[in-house]
Amino acid sequence: MESENWIVCVEPTHVALIDLKNSAQVTRRPIKAEAAVMNPSSNILALRSGKMIQMFNLDTKSKLKSHEVDSPIVFWKWTSPTNLALVTATSVYHWGIEGAEAPAKIFERHPTIGSNTQIINYAVSPDRKWCLLGGISAGSTPGVVNGNMQLYSVEKKVSQPLSGHGGSFCTIKLAGRDDMAQCLVFHEKKPEDPAHRLFVMEVGRDPSKGAPHRLPPTQIPVPPEAATDFPVSLVIDTKNDVAFLLTKAGFVYMFDIHSGKTMFRTRITQETMFVTCYQASAGAVLGITVRTGRVYRIGLNGANLIPYIVNTLRDNDLAIKVAGRLGLPGAEHLYTQQFEALMGAGQVKEAALLVASSGTALRTPQTIARFQQIPAEPGAPQPVFQYFSTLLEHGKLNEQESIELAKPVLQQGRPQLMEKWLKDDKLHCSEALGDLIMPHDTAMALSVYLRSETHGKAIQCFVQRGEYDKIVPYSTSVGYSMDYSSMLSQLLFNNPQGALDLAKGLVSADGGPLIDIQATAEAFLSSNRVQETTAFLLEALKDNKEEHAYLQTKLLEINLIGGAPQVADAIMQNGILTHYDRAHIGKLCERAGMWQRAAEHYTDINDIKRVFKNSHQMNPEFVVTYFGKLNREQSIALLKDMMSRGPSNMQVCVEVAKKYNDELGSEELVKVFENAKATEGLYYYLGAVVNFSEDPVVHFKYIQSACMLGQFKEAERVCRDSNIYKPEQVKEYLKNAKLPDPRPLIHVCDRFDFVDELTEYLYLNSLLQYVEVYVTKVSPGKTPQVVGKLFDLGANEDFTKRILMAVGTACPVEEMVEVAEMRNRLRMLQPWLEARVATGSTEPGTHNALGKIYIQLNKDPKAFLTNNMFYEPKVLGPFCESLDPSLAFVAYKKGAGECDDELIKISFTHGLFRDLARYLVERQDLELWAKVLTKEEGDEGDIDVEKESQRRQLIDQVVEWALPESESADEVSCTVKAFMAADLPGELIVLLERIILQGSDFSDNKNLQNLLILTAIRADHTKVASYIDQLDNFDAKDIALICVSESHMLYEEAFTIYVKFAKPEHTTDKDEQIEMQVLAIGVLVDYMKDLDRAKTFANQVDEKPVWSKLGNAQLEEKMAADAILSFINAEDPSEYVRVCAEANEAEIYAEVIPFLKMARKNLQENLLDTELIYAYAKTNNLTDLEKFVNGPNVANIQNIGDRCFSEGLYNAAKLLFKSINNNSKLALCHIHLEEYREAVAAATLANNVSTWKQVCFACLKAAEYRLAATCGLEVIKYPDHVDDVVTFYSDLGHFDHLVSLFEQGLGLEDAHIGIFTELGILYTKHVPEKVMEHCKVFFSKLNVSKVVRACERARLFKPAVYLYMHDKQADNAVKTMSEHANAFDNDLFLDSIVRVRNAEIMYKAVNFYLTMHPMLFTRLMEVLEDHVDHSRVVNQLRRTGDWALQLGQAYMKSVQKENLSAVNEALNELYIEDEDYESLRKSIDKFQNFNMIALASKLATHELLEFRRISAYVYRCNKKWSQSIELSKNDRMWKDCIDTANESADEETIEDLLRFFCETSEKECFCAALYTCFTHVRPDVAIELGWLNGYQNFIMPFMVQNIRQTHDRLKVLEKRTQPPKEEDAKDQIAQTYGQLGGFGGGMLMLENGGGMGGMMPPQQGIDMSGFGQPGMMPNGGNYGGMMPNGMPGMMPGSMSISSGAHKSNCHFSSKICSHPAGTTLQRNSYQRINIHSLNGRHHYNALLCTSSHDDDRACDEDSIRYPPDISCDVRSVAQDLWSPFGSIFMSSSYHIIGGNGSILCHQDCQGEMPLPSSIPISQRFAYFEQQAQKGDPRAQHSIGLLLWNGFASTTEQKLDAKIDPEASARWHAAAAVQGNLDALAVFGGCLRTGTGVGKCKNIALGLRCIEYSASVGNPSGVNKKGAMMESNDDYFGAMKLYKECYEDETKRTNALLLFNMGYCLIHGEGVDHDVEEGEKLWRDAVELAPEEGSEEAAWFLYQQYFERGDNEMAMHYLNIAADLGLGDAVIESRRNS
């Protein structure tokens, strides 16, 4: 157990893992190991088996690492999650998890902790600079264990021995010090000193910081009974700075590390905790016991610690310090006393320190007041400030302290102090603190409100600070709701920008918009905020929901019609809105001249054709892309329409056809071009797709068009490379075309095997030179076909021979020979064949043909067949068979095994047996032998007589001639094996006897002798014995093993062999002789089972191994006594386990004693000593037994003692248990021997509860009551065993003795709660009069529940109630008093009822008092007023009766303040019954929670007026105006009528009342009603009633007031609607578009919308119909604000353009860069052009060269110019990429633009920037960045490469690759704009793939950049183009490109070009392998470092040299690659270092 997570147990075949974090779930894994430990923090398991240690990751199920140590590991432990400590007999090692390193040796073990010391602990300090190794060893005094420790300093490499048993390291915070103290806590016990001490000392502190902390050693209070006890572990609780010391005897000591004092000691177990660990999560210690495996958790009980120190240890100083440090309760009174003493003595500082260290005990407002009341001394700070300063030094202030400190600090004007304290988290943030700070610092107050979660005031701070965008996220995150609409309306007039920010936040809130989008947009538009409306709608509609389609349409319409089409264009370009009315928007775009956008929105082909009439004004790329949106029919129709308008559209149509070839179909596209008669367009289109198309028509049409245009090379290429076209069709076309160059036809016929037709075509058309060219250059392999056709055509033979000689060896000879043979022209080939042989040809066909010619001509054929090495025997052999069989045999023999079947056949056919026999012996081929020796059977199983005769003849020739003539042992051996394989044992024996017994060179051959004997064993057993006697040179052991095998069972022969070869004349080695004798007796005992003969043989030889073998055999046969004698003779104790087992089974204990004594001389085994003791015991030899056990032995005395005890050998067991001090078992032995006093004495020594219990019960049974009581007192100390004692005593009926025993137990020092509880239970049963007294005296020590149950069983209810009350079980106490009258007590009941947990008991108590004690009910309800549901109580009173309601009236009045309906209704009923209308009116006014309508209805008919008024009042309160007024009318309560009508605010009700007053002539009431209800009366009604009834005078006050109010309202309205001043209404377009938030925070990409100028003021020309605004002008309004030249607001010295679309930028640039012919400018003059984005935020400068119209080369005569289109497009994209980041960094020295807008390329601005020698490679990025920002294009190119490759980092951080594709693309763009061709090529790659350029991806432009850069010979362009060719598998073309650039001396090369060429040469890609030349190029590339490609060249050179073993050169190039920052090289370099 290494941590609180896992316990690991090693079982015989498994490792058990107990997951303590998962309910102790057990997982068993099938792992065999000696030991296992789990990593403390991760699931990594370390295993140990022997010297092998391994680590496994259980999560990934993989092995991390393994190692085999040199010496066994005696102890291991995880010292950290990454390190495993290993302790051997001599040294200590550390083994880390990471890497593959072996364990590292840390230090050697000190002599004082040598091999005789058992290691039990190892610890490493937190800083890993100190190690502590601990162990134990036997002391000089028996029973004493010494502790030895070694403290080792890793830095100083020195050790210090310590005398002690345990120690550990910890880090603590000491008072008065800022730094942490690393302390060593250890136990010391010197052998000569009985005292135990605890040391605490600091280690590893820097002397410059002061002396290290060290406490004087403190005495450890060891109890007297543990004098020989010793610690086994010391664990630090780092959470509480407490040390736990655990001992072998089960004691636990707890120490305070800061003082070294002992705080607690107890004994928790009788067993030893052999393993412990710290539980960090709970600040406790976990331990496991040795025998029972129990897991203990030992921790600090904070609630009881301080009271224990105060009351038991009586150490107030320690209690104060510990309580203050740990914040524990229990020392409050001590703090108070000390505080008062310090304050009384005037020690303010000390008192403040005491408060700070007291936790929360003294941190109260009263303490603050005490310090505030102390007057300040002159020249000294105020005491309260000293107090707060002290608290701040020690921690954080609470809420009240923070407020009290803030008041004076803010008054003094020092808010910076508050800011510092808040930043340091020293103050408790609260609303009150924020209110204090708010007037002084809003930001600080906001911080306080946020921390204190005062949301409303935090939002007020946001508003006050203008941070509107933060309001919504904050309120949403905290769940705070508020009225946003009113806030937005208010901001819209005061702060429109703030309103916009707030509105954006509201519509973007999580969970959906918090405002209505359309209404908000309408509000913005109503205030003429068009820009804000656009920005808001972009934010609101960014989710692109379908339900917002109308708003999307309006948004675009506003900008398209309102003069800002570029905004609409940008919105559509980003594609964030898709649900608008596309047809409507398309028409608007077409009207605005935005043709591309219009085309995007149209779907009807007629509309599209109309728009595409302006395709010349569209971007070609757009046109090509647009066709992808059309269906097939639309695309074809549009293409036909475009092609019909002339050749101007042909190029773009070709591009469309190229891209959409698959979608549109090549057949239709071909028709389009053919119908337009655009052969050239067809050619270019097909040329682009032919390489990828699989349509035969495409390939044929391309060949056809190429031929028509004279592009014969292309036609030849396709004919040569294509596999798609139809060859027959192409062949016929080419033949009929009669091309002047027949090479396309040649390739077609060659590829598709039209050779005969080709030959005939060329021959008949007199193109014989092409025939020769064809066979020599094109296809030499087709020469036989050509020659054959020429033969058939009757061509000149000389011409044919000339062709053959010209082709030479390239012609396939087999086919040529076949053609010649078919036409009987073979001899004509002789000169050609001989010429081939003369050139060294080894082709079999050539030599086969010559051989046939020579054999036919009889030109010395045997010599040819014998000497020629190249012909094929299988060809010439059959050719010779019909002419001469002997020649065929020679030819077949030449085949060296290939023609064996033919050779055997011809030999058997022609009787060549002797030649065949010699051939077989010489060949030594077993398979060949098998072919001739194996018998062949016919179909019916009979043997072919003729073949058998031939086989016998062959065997005879072998035996008689071939083998005797042989002198080769291998030939003889192979022949013998062949006979064996053929199963010819008889023939084989004859053969071997002739060789061995008749005398030959092989007579003594061991293998042959072995073979002869083995053959005889197999074929003839009778000859085996004679062969054994005659032969001496054979393998005796092997032959004997075969003899005794189950298949032969020749036991006598085997015994004879062993006996023969055991003699000295055959075996000289003594050991081998003995081995033979052992094998011989093994035959007798294992196979023959003749033990008597074996015993005789053993007596004869008298050798110990023989006796040992015999003893094992006798043991197997259960002859234990004989076996024992044999083992004694052999002096062999090896089988002692089996001997002991058999002796025990046979019970021959006396006989086994001599054997055991003999075995103990050689072995020291536990079993031997144990069995010897047992034998002594069984033979009752107690004297020898006692002598033996007192002497040295390794017996398991415990086990044998238990064995003797279980078998009743108590005397022997007593001796054994006494020898090992097992007093528990000793006591049991005394009991069985009836020695009770001795048993008690032994139990005293054992001090074990189970022993005490057994002795106690035995003494009790024997009536030894005094002894039983002595033992019983020891037993009842343990709570778990108290019940057993009580049960045993009770069963025997000794109740008085039992009570007396527990009464004595009360006086025990460690008496526990169980004793007091059990005594109380016994009193309830046997002495009830003592129960109450016992409960009162010992309540705190009772188990209340058990005693209460006992009291209830004895019906003692008063003690039960007492216990319930004091145990805070008020529920049970009340229940008991309610159920038992004799237990009731009113005061006690009232005290209990308010403490009950079950509220139902309270309601039962109400019923109980109403029933049993009604006079006490009021008092009960006074107590229960705050605890009960009053409605329920009232219902209880109602159910009880009316008298109960009357009884409870006082109670209900007291609780009516709760305003409960049940209470109100009950009281109202009582008031009505009592006719108390005043109380009723007060009740209704104050408490209206009741059924008011029911009450009003009830009172409406009451006989008393006041009650009827109350009814009207109630109706009025419930808005029942008519009922209330009717009641008041009936009672003529006019004022009530008027007040009710006014309160109703209902015009109809008021008018009815007015008419009623007119009808009843109540003029005064009519006037009063007009006055009271003024705001609700319509003037016309008042005038009408006054006129009809003549009440003009009564209505005049109303009219005067009405006119005045109308006047005031109109005045306010006029002021509000006053138009704004002219200067305040200026249009701020740039501000609007700068705030657009719909594009992720980036700027809009705006385009010049057809030359439109600035935006009109939006008041007149915008269609706001969707928002309730006036309609737009018919034509959309004029485009105002335009200057005559079409540019808005242009200054004379500068020009303003958009940074948007590429096309308009190009147009603008061409304008700027060209001048009229009449303009006169100086050479190299420049004009600075200010280019800025539309919103006016981002701008940059470009220096544009202006020159004369007729002198474009004025800038640089030698410079290269970009093409104008590339210049324009690259510059435009660069502007787009740089616009969000400010200016492009340019230099006037490089950025030069010619007159036609093309960028000039200086020679000195090409390539990468050289790195000065003074700048290290590791700092190149910083240097290049500095130069790049100065505008150097080479530096910009270099920094772009570093950002692309990830080398933009320092050498120390090479692995932290800083890869930034976007920044890389920007820098390359900047360099390309300044004419760096290398950057242009790389930037072209970015544009082609879209890497780093985002939406600026432009494949066509990228390819043009790369192509142009490569065309002018730039190496980077060549590299890029070559890479694209390689990606298409055109390695030859790529290599050709590289080579041309490299060999051109006028061109520059770079490192990457050299690397690419070297790579192709080394790997043979596109060129022949040339490793040497390739490595040379790589070395040249390295010389150009740090250029791009040099790092890869260095890395590959390292690999090359490393593979060939040149480590020096390999490391040289590895270091270069690593210095250049290549990631793989850095990793490899670090690994090597």
Image (cartoon, grey):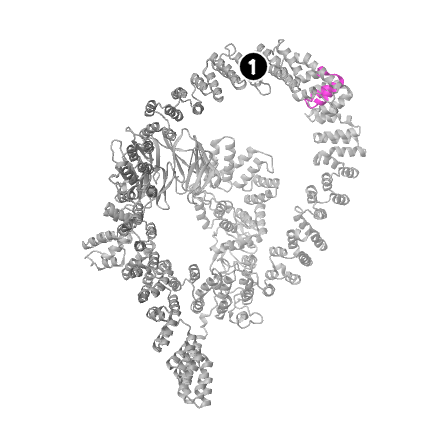
Q: What's the residue at 63%, 56% (across, down)?
A: 627
Main SS category, magenta section:
helix
Q: Position of residue 1501 (x, y in %)?
A: 42, 80
Q: Position of residue 1819 (x, y in %)?
A: 43, 43
Residue 1313 vs residue 429, the one in the foreground:
1313
Q: What's the residue at 39%, 87% (across, down)?
A: 1564
Q: Position of residue 1592 (x, y in %)?
A: 43, 89
Lateral position of residue 1511 relative to residue 721, left or right: left
Residue 1309 vs residue 336, the one in the foreground:
1309
Q: What's the residue at 53%, 72% (across, down)?
A: 1668
Q: Is residue 2033 visible?
A: no
Residue most extreme to the top: 999
Query: In which quadrant of the rendered view does residue 72 lie?
Result: top left
Q: Secondary structure at mark 1?
A: helix
Quadrant of image for the N terminus: top left
Q: Position of residue 1238 (x, y in %)?
A: 29, 32
